[in-house]
Image (cartoon, rainbow, N blue to C red):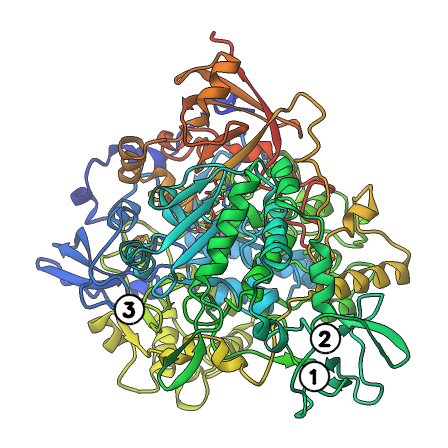
Amino acid sequence: MNTKSLANSLPKMSRRSFLKSSLAITGAAALGGGTAFAGTALAASGNPVPNGNAKWVKHYCGSCIWPNCGTEVKVVNGVAVEVRGNKEHPSNQGTLCPRGAAQLMNLYNPYRIKAPLKRTNPEKGLDVDPGWVEISWEEAMDTVTEKIRAAQAKDPRKLMMMYGFAGNLHETPFVKLFTAIFGTPNYSMSCGPLCEVHHAPAMFNATFVDRIDAGRCNYLITFGRNLGGSAMFASGPGRAMADAVDRGMKLVVFDPHATPDASKGEWVPIRPGTDNAVGMAMLHVILYELNTFDVDAVKNRCNGPYLIDKQGDYVRHPESNKPLIWDEADGKAKVFDDPTLTNPAILGEYTVNGVSAFPAFVAIRESVATATPEWAEEISSVPAADIRRITKNLVEAACIGSTINIDGFEFPYRPVAVTVGRGSANNMMGMNFYILADIINMVLGAIGVPGSLLHAAGPKFIFEDGMMRENPIAFYTTDREKKFSIPNNDYTMKQFYPLSRFPVLGATMGAILDPQKYYLDYELEVLFPHGANPFQNDADYETTAKAFQKVPFIFTVGYHLDETSMFCDIILPECSHMERYQNRPINETMTVGLDSIALDGLNYKEPVVDLVYNTRQYDDVIVELADRLGLTPKLNTIYNGFYKLSGEFSLDPGKKYTYPEMLDIRLKGFSGSASKGVEYFREHGFLMKNIPLKECYEYYFFKGKGRLPLYNWRDLSAGRALQRSLDKYGVKVPAWDNQEEAMREYTPVPKWFDNHLTNKSDEFDMTVANWKISPRSLGLGGQDDNVWLREVVETWEYDGLNIQINPVTAAAKGLKTGDKVIIESQHGGKVEGILQVTNLIHPEVVGFPAQGGRISQFMNPISRKGSNYNRLLTYKEGYVLSENGSVSVSSRVKISKAEVK
Ligand SMILES: Nc1nc2c(c(=O)[nH]1)N[C@H]1C(S)=C(S)[C@@H](COP(=O)(O)OP(=O)(O)OC[C@H]3O[C@@H](n4cnc5c(=O)[nH]c(N)nc54)[C@H](O)[C@@H]3O)O[C@H]1N2
Ligand SMILES: Nc1nc2c(c(=O)[nH]1)N[C@H]1C(S)=C(S)[C@@H](COP(=O)(O)OP(=O)(O)OC[C@H]3O[C@@H](n4cnc5c(=O)[nH]c(N)nc54)[C@H](O)[C@@H]3O)O[C@H]1N2
Ligand code: SF4
Ligand SMILES: [Mo]
């Protein structure tokens, strides 16, 4: 269904008063006197801005994945009129990007939800008029409370929350801890299946995201990591990259599309979904052709020397059960932490405990024995000579053997990094490739040391078997086997995808529609999506629509009437970013420079003006809901635990607080001072607690204590644990026709397998690629109907929201810029759009910048422009990433000219 046909098929919508009033509004000034809702905690706590005066209010931006930028908002006579960067703020140092500057339109967007709404039409669908009517907050909260209470009385698991990026940005415990407070295991995330950027950081180095030490890196290779469009925040990352390029850092970009950062280095066009082949060839060149790598790192900083048996398991000491290493110094097997261990063997074969064993490095090496650059060229289209040249440059730039002294501590100095983003990681074999990139970094010793790829989480590492243990927040392998149950306890489906960080959205939707197939013996009754859009941002939106139609009661706390709202029974309108009390940790991620690497602190914001409409802050809604359900003590206790609050600076479990009061205690807990609560932060906007420089490099914590997983025994054991659980209950991974495919990614060493992107035996002769563009944050922060940002996209972005193909392909297919085209996917999806012919795209690829084609009829019509490439993707098992259920961001497609009517 495309936008046009949907619009034509829509019933005549009865435009209710909330829309009428919005259209009458012409300017920000007219809104200054908008209705504030006197009953909220926010209003009760007092307006910080005196009317009649011009004043700059300290704030921080609410418009990006990493909203570090400190801002100041100019308020005149109660109307916010300007945003500027806070010069005192160490993160952005006074700068601001267009998304930040355009926040005024987020506040004064006439398409916001202005009062609580109730649907009067019981029929639900993306093209059905819900028949919204305005109701009071009291009525709305009564209805929601009663529905939750009724579901809880039957089975607390009948309640499910779904959050997305717009909700995530609240930085409140009440998004992530909603399930704990309301006592259900069921949650889902629209920002999961297409956002698999955490796998290798979590598995390889126990952190949430990795970051490039751009302040010291000299040679940076990116695979599907769109630094220009996605990570050039106005804060530290943008500055770090600009400084690095000025300093002469070489940048090599493997991407089907020439990203903005590729213009600052070398662009290597690659067929989507084939990065794993190129990575294997790079490792082959390093280990077989150049035979130059960081021998010390392989011997002493990873599990390269751990002895493994023919089954791939560690060979362990019979008594202590510790993994063994062969010491070449005296020809003996020793436990990994034996103080006499001097020269770990990384090659050869040994007999230990009566079995034949070899160092894990041997298995890694053999896995790429035949992965020549010529083999990879066939698969990826990247010339073998380029793979050899780039790999050689990388190895030379690694300065293997050199050291650097930071704060009196001697580090290996490896100024190179191979880094992976969504385009590669979220693609077929992406999890394997993500790990492989870290294997390449590891054999060069370029991980966690100055100049290389770092991990942001700080000194929270736990070691097991001498190895860093996986990130505890991601709870992987062993825990999941213990919790595996049939009937299945929850709708997250994580138990069938043991390496998933997120709930498996597609499987959850399938389970709502057919619980038995997913071994569930109960149905959901209440669904609470918040700032989540599984219709626009994920795959198979028609299945999601059917699942949403099936759940009896859905409510949201919403900013505008997005696609998800179309299925809601009750809508509670929420404050915009400039009307919220919030705090948010400051730490630079993804890319760090010399002046941003050690930043650590907390940002603060509060409403800059009276509430423009009859809205409440999300947090106040949750606090109120919990109170109505008798859950205040639980909520307060969980809040204390989340922020590690105790004693003087902690909540009294028996007392009901407003959110600003809770925040005040949190800020005092953070600063450790009674004088540094809300008042202090109001005046300063932030508080820094920078970390010592040497602690920014994990090597500092690992040296002599733990190693990294060159050999991914964990992947192997996760697959085996899953198989044991399936066998124990005699069940299958639900919905996979081919169980072998469901198990194929659990490999401890690099591996290649053909898949739906590489099997080109039909008419779908091209592959899609999609990327983010800097002025546009998906739906994040309500940008899609932010008219100022829209103008930036349409006036200044070279590609607007048009579909791109290469001139060679265009000529062969008789297509030209401006043609209306239809793209059809191998999975059956279809989208229309306007063509842009450009050299900046691989000849076999159809490129989709950002995302367009919003279908909600209640948002600003400008948001409907463009095409929604997500229609071309699928959740269908066999096409997703088997280890974690993530969706492949590519599919094969064909392109044709649309008939002009
Ligand atoms: N085509 C395409 N699809 C993608 C991606 C891509 O690059 N291209 N990226 C993927 C990635 S990495 C991610 S993380 C996900 C993100 O996907 P989601 O988590 O779904 O995030 P958003 O689209 O940012 O926002 C979700 C919804 O919140 C609404 N919203 C905006 N502001 C507010 C607000 O203040 N309050 C509330 N309650 N709602 C608000 C938006 O209109 C939108 O409908 O998308 C994935 N999907
Ligand atoms: N402006 C803006 N910035 C954002 C966001 C936003 O919405 N807007 N969202 C934030 C979020 S939630 C996330 S997760 C991060 C993600 O940031 P990134 O990981 O950088 O992800 P994308 O921007 O989606 O970029 C994916 C890149 O991969 C390329 N690509 C696609 N397929 C392939 C492939 O098969 N192989 C290779 N080598 N490349 C491929 C695309 O062309 C694109 O350049 O960005 C964050 N930053
Ligand atoms: S970089 Fe991010 S936080 Fe900074 S102004 Fe832009 S959107 Fe806001
Ligand atoms: Mo994401």
Instruction: Report the residue marked by disc 1.
Output: 336
User: Which is closer to the viewer, label 1 or label 3?
Assistant: 1
| Residue 595, label in figure | 3
Q: Whole-percent x and y of residue 633?
A: 53, 78
Q: Which badge, 1 or 2, comes first in the chain's sequence?
A: 2
Q: Whole-percent x and y of residue 82?
A: 17, 51
**Does 502 sit above or below residue 559?**
below
Q: Whole-percent x and y of residue 874?
A: 64, 37
Q: Secondary structure at mark 2?
A: loop
Q: Amino acid at mark 2?
A: Tyr
Left or right of 177? Residue 798 is left
Residue farthest top in this picture: 901
Q: Residue 548: name its quadrant.
A: top right
- Identity of the residue drawn at 23% across and 36% down: 25
Instruction: Report the residue marked by disc 2.
Output: 306
Q: Amino acid at mark 1?
A: Phe
Q: Residues within 10 Å of mark 3 (few under 14, many from 20)?
A: few
Residues 145 and 806: in front is 806
**Does 810 sit above or below residue 225?**
above
Q: Secondary structure at mark 3?
A: loop
Left or right of 607? Residue 762 is right
How far is disc 1 from disc 2 in space, using C-alphas?
Answer: 8 Å
| Visible residue check, residue 681 | yes
Label 1 close to label 3 by CB (< 8 Å): no
Left or right of 410? Residue 111 is left
Label 1 close to label 2 by CB (< 8 Å): yes
Quadrant housing the N terminus: top right
- Identity of the residue drawn at 45% across and 44% down: 117
User: Which is closer to the viewer, label 2 or label 3?
Assistant: 2
Q: Whole-percent x and y of residue 901?
A: 47, 7
How far is disc 1 from disc 3 in space, using C-alphas?
Answer: 38 Å
